[in-house]
């Protein structure tokens, strides 16, 4: 199989390097890039997909609201998920449960990235902030008892967001989620 080029947009989260390493371990040509990159900088690298990492706050998201609108398959993780929601007209809010913890997830729709993961799974997540309202043209994929929007996708574009961290070992089937996203990128190539 062809080695895909995936760029990890660094939002200064604690696990950016784990996303990069996980993708590399799955045989991808993965590169960690700054969230202050321009759209042109990203497109010059001819990526097959983008992964937006988690991070501390929306204020540290750099040029993320522009980058997340690039016409490529995109996976937003934690802050990346929130950034996607905000950029496409959704709402974010401070979560009731901050910090990292185990979260039991209910899969509402087992789509492309959640294939083989449901109907329930256990993940490692931070809910310092969370998506409060889906953007127009997005559908709910997963929820939990502490967050109504744990995962979402765009109805027609290959845009996916998850509140949790598939790159950490505490997340059951996190590698499968990343493999599923890689397959989305491969199909679009």
Image (tube, rainbow, N blue to C red):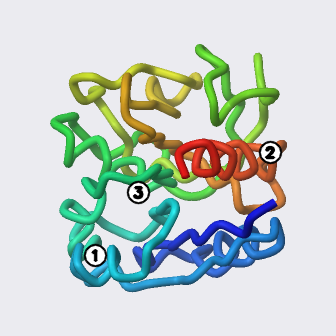
Using residue 13 as the reference point, say whether residue 69 is left or right of it.
left
Of the pair 188 and 33, the residue shown nearer to us = 188
Tag 1 and tag 3, C-beta contact below 8 Å: no
Using residue 99 as the reference point, say whether residue 173 is left or right of it.
right
On residue 82, the disc is none
Residue at 51% x, 33% y is: 151
Rendering coords of residue 100 (x, y %):
61, 57
Q: Quickly name the residue at label 2.
A: 176
Q: Quickly name the residue at label 1.
A: 60
Rendering coords of residue 149 (x, y %):
44, 28
Q: Tag 1 or tag 2, which sits nearer the N-term?
A: 1
Q: Secondary structure at mark 2?
A: helix
- The answer to whether 176 is drawn above or below residue 65 in the figure is above
Residue at 33% x, 74% y is: 43
Neighbour class for label 3 at 10 Å: few (<14), some, many (≥20)? Answer: many
- The answer to whether 110 is drawn above or below residue 13 in the figure is above
Give the alpha-carbon distance from disc 2 to disc 1, as whole Å: 29 Å
Rendering coords of residue 12 (x, y %):
44, 80
Of the pair 47 and 151, the residue shown nearer to us = 47
What is the number of callouts on the image? 3
The quadrant of the image that shows the N terminus is bottom right
Give the alpha-carbon distance from disc 1 to disc 3, as whole Å: 11 Å
- The answer to whether 76 is drawn above or below residue 56 in the figure is above
Q: Quickly name the residue at label 3.
A: 80
């Amino acid at each position: 199989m062809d080695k895909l080029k995936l760029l990890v947009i660094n939002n200064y989260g604690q696990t950016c390097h784990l996303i990069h390493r996980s993708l590399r371990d799955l045989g991808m040509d993965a590169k960690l890039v700054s969230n202050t990159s321009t759209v042109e900088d990203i497109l010059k690298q001819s990526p097959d997909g983008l992964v937006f990492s988690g991070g501390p706050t929306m204020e540290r998201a750099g040029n993320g609201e522009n980058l997340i609108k690039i016409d490529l398959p995109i996976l937003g993780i934690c802050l990346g998920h929130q950034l996607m929601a905000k950029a496409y007209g959704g709402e974010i809010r401070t979560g009731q449960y901050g910090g990292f913890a185990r979260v039991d997830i209910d899969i509402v729709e087992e789509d492309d990235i959640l294939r083989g993961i449901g109907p329930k799974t256990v993940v490692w997540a931070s809910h310092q902030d969370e998506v409060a309202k889906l953007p127009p043209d997005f559908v709910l994929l997963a929820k939990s008892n502490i967050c109504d929007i744990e995962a979402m996708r765009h109805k027609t574009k290959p845009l996916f967001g998850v509140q949790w961290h598939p790159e950490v070992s505490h997340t059951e089937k996190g590698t499968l989620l990343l493999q599923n996203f890689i397959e989305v990128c491969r199909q679009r190539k």
